[in-house]
Amino acid sequence: MPRKKNMTSLLDSFESDTEKEHEAAVTAASKTPKKSIDGDTRATALVSMTKDEKERLTTKAKAHGLSLSAFFRLAADEYMSTHNW
């Protein structure tokens, strides 16, 4: 039994460290101004989805020569235009 407790403790520690690293990366990304080709400053937005959704959307974006970010921007613009938002 002690081994199981140690493994659980180890996994909890790993999960905690991974979460801290993720939070630090998100903080750094949101504080780092990004410039586009036309000189506009870029902001970062996090979009939560399942792994399968991300794979499907990334595949579709790449099939049209787009990054996932560009695909989302175009899709959002198209949706707002089509639905008169």
Image (cartoon, grey):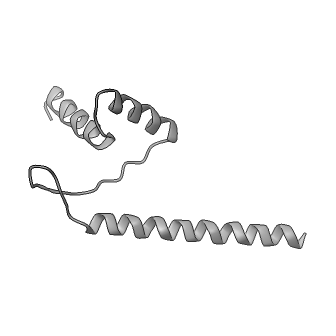
Q: Is residue 66 left or right of residue 47?
A: left
Residue 5, percent across and down?
81, 71
The spot of residue 56 in percent (x, y) is 44, 31
**x, y (%) of residue 13?**
65, 72
The answer to whether residue 8 is above or below residue 40 is below
In this rendering, would 38 be left or right of 13?
left
Quadrant of the frame with the N terminus: bottom right
Give the quarter of the image for residue 73.
top left
How many numbered markers are drawn? 0
Q: Quadrant of residue 42?
A: bottom left
What is the quadrant of the C terminus in the image? top left
Q: Is residue 54 left or right of residue 1?
A: left
Q: Residue furthest right?
A: 1
Residue drawn at x 22%, y 57% as measured from the top left = 43
Residue at position x 33%, y 40% in the image: 68
Residue at position x 33%, y 32% in the image: 61
Position of residue 14 measured from the top left corner of the image (x, y, whole percent): 63, 68
Residue at left offset 56%, top offset 71%: 17
Q: Is residue 16 above or below residue 47?
A: below
User: Is 84 located above or below residue 19 in the figure?
Assistant: above
Residue 7, image quadrant: bottom right
